[in-house]
Image: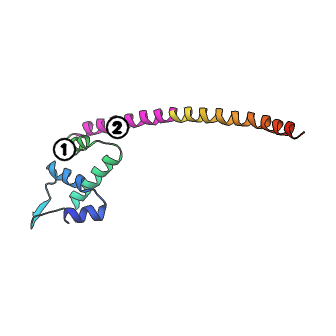
Amino acid sequence: MTIYEVSERYNIPMNILREYESWGLCGAVKKVMGDWQYDDTDLERLSLIMTLHDIGFESSEVETYMKLLEEKDTEAQRLRLLNKKRADTLDEIHFREKQLERLDYLRYHIRRQQEENKPAARKTSRNTKQ
């Protein structure tokens, strides 16, 4: 499959495919008539690259992870990268939860003020009618 076919069929942006090629990790990719040809192994690697991007890895982190994957006995290093990303993601989640709590607090006070002002508005309209 050519780079264009892979991009279209699997909805992988061309810049990611070109980046993958530039890392030199696509050993099985062959040039046929001027076009790169991807095999099943390359597609599996690309799937992992897309997953890493989707979970928030920067391109440099993806490259590091993929190069480690090519080496032997790097499970501990790859696990450290994944654990760090997990910890960073949890920190982000906790930060967002605190933001939501503050938003809800402000919304609560506005609603409470609205409720307190409703009876006053009714009393005022009754007094003006009399």
The quadrant of the image that shows the N terminus is: bottom left
> Which numbered disc, 1 or 2, marks the residue that appears first in the sequence?
1
Q: Residue at x 25, y 44 (%)?
A: 59
In this rendering, the answer to whether 41 lies above or below 58 is below
Q: Is residue 55 magenta?
A: no
Find residue 73 and report its image quarter.
top left
Spot the residue most to the right.
130
Residue 85's disc number: 2
Residue situated in front as seen by the camera: 21 or 107: 107
Coordinates of residue 78 in the picture (x, y in percent)? 27, 39
Residue 38's disc number: none
Q: Judge the density around disc 1: few (<14), some (14-19), many (≥20) Cα neighbours within 10 Å.
A: some
In this rendering, the answer to whether 21 lies above or below 96 is below
The three-letter code of the residue at mark 2 reads Lys
Q: Judge the density around disc 2: few (<14), some (14-19), many (≥20) Cα neighbours within 10 Å.
A: some
Question: Where does the magenta region start and end?
Answer: 74-98
Coordinates of residue 67 in the picture (x, y in percent)? 19, 44
The quadrant of the image that shows the C terminus is: top right
What colour scheme does the image use? rainbow
Q: Is residue 84 magenta?
A: yes
Q: Is residue 18 left or right of residue 95?
A: left
Residue 67's disc number: 1
Q: Secondary structure at mark 1?
A: helix
The three-letter code of the residue at mark 1 reads Lys
Q: Secondary structure at mark 2?
A: helix
